[in-house]
Image: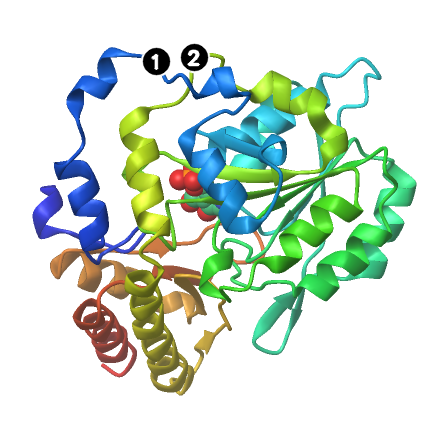
Amino acid sequence: MKESNTNFLDRNEFNYAPSQKVVDALKNFDVNTLCFYTRIYDEGKKSIFSEFLSELYNIDETQILLGYGGEDILKQAVHFFLTEEDGNKTILIPSLSWWYYKSIADEVNGDTIQYPLFEENDTFKYNVQVLAEMVKKEKPKVVLIASPNNPTGNSLTPVELETILLQIPHTTQVLIDEAYASFISNDSSYIKILVNKFPNIIIIRTLSKFYGLPGLRMGFGFMSKELSRFSSYSNKYLGYNRISEAIAIAALESDEHYRDIAAKMNEDRQAYEEELGALPGFKVYKSAANFILIKYPIELKPALKEAFSKENFKIKFMDEPGINTHLRITLGRQEQNRKVIDIIKSVATS
Ligand SMILES: Cc1ncc(COP(=O)(O)O)c(C=O)c1O
């Protein structure tokens, strides 16, 4: 299948164009820079990007993590904590969440336990009490929270997140996957408050979703000061990819470009809710991310598959227990979203 003809709405990628600043950062990148390692390590810093993030988020540079995408920071953290000397290999992850969490725990023989998300009207919800009780009983080494969660699309407010953190003992490390968080709000001031209040948390973000650069492979995180043992494990003595650093800074300096696109996605999210939500047997879940979860009558599966494939659209037909009569569709460009809605409507009403 040729990439250019296919509408990829199956992996929460970015179907718009990068900002002009990003394009210019790549065009104007001085390739001679690549002949040398960065010297910023001599100043006690990891990268020009961690220095930039430190100013932007007003968080000490030593509390910033960088990685090859959010996935890399998640993998490093899960591997690190589940193989510490205390031998505690238990990790709690949300049910109905990204398959990757269990997979990285499996790589180090972790014991994965799922805590439930509860379906309520048109959303899924965390239940603080249930989670707190499971933490008390299982005494996990790691609890993973995803907000917004993939594929359900539900998210936590900073206050809800803090309520959960208050219930978790400091011997348990909390990884908060915020890969999709910038779609909810551009207020990230709570991050500084939380990483300075709690000694056991890591908040992970990425350039791949809101900033639309999954091919850049750049993720970043914020951690409690008390976790310096993890940052020395994670740091790269010889630095990071210098092209990616320059592009990442340009992307974060182009907030307006990406906010405009997020606003368009918001309009389309509403169209999904109104138009598909009205079809018999369909339910469109509230989403705080760049994808939308839709329950559909399972008997339409073959016809939907055929219709999408005929029009060169890739979307995700979920098959996990609990959400196996569901589609997860990435919000693409407006004309792509229009087409998806029309395809589903024509299959549902034929
Ligand atoms: C929930 C979630 N977290 C993290 C990621 C990691 O993305 P990346 O490694 O590109 O930053 C993804 C990618 O799809 C995701 O769905």
**What residue is rendered at 79% in x and 55% in y?**
164
Q: Which residue is mark 1?
A: 37
Which percent across, then down, holds residue 31? 16, 22
Q: Position of residue 57 (x, y in %)?
A: 55, 50
Q: Position of residue 276 (x, y in %)?
A: 36, 80
Q: Is residue 213 visible?
A: no
- Mark 1 residue crowding within 10 angstroms, few (<14) / some (14–19) / many (20+): some
Q: Is residue 73 left or right of residue 194?
A: left
Give SS at disc 2: loop
Q: Are marks 1 and 2 in contact (CB under 8 Å)?
A: yes
Q: Residue at x 56, y 76 (%)?
A: 122
Given residues 307 and 235, the one toward you in this image is: 235
Q: Nearer the viewer, residue 133 or 262?
A: 262
Residue 265 is left or right of residue 95, and the answer is left
The kind of residue tagged 1 is Tyr
Rendered position, 213 above or below 77: below
Which image quadrant: the N terminus?
A: top left
Who is closer to the viewer here, 196 or 88? 196
At label 2, which amino acid type do we have? Leu
The image quadrant of residue 27 is top left
Q: Which residue: 35% across, 34% down?
A: 217
Residue at 76% from the left image edge and 24% from the top image edge: 89
Q: Which mark is residue 238?
A: 2
Q: Nearer the viewer, residue 309 or 197?
A: 197
Quadrant in which ligand 1 is drawn = top left
Q: Is residue 209 above or below residue 231?
A: below
What is the C-alpha distance between the residues marked 1 and 2?
6 Å
Q: Is residue 214 above or below residue 265?
A: above
- Residue sitting at the far front: 43
Left or right of 298 on screen, residue 205 = right
The tag earlier along the polypeptide, 1 or 2, is: 1
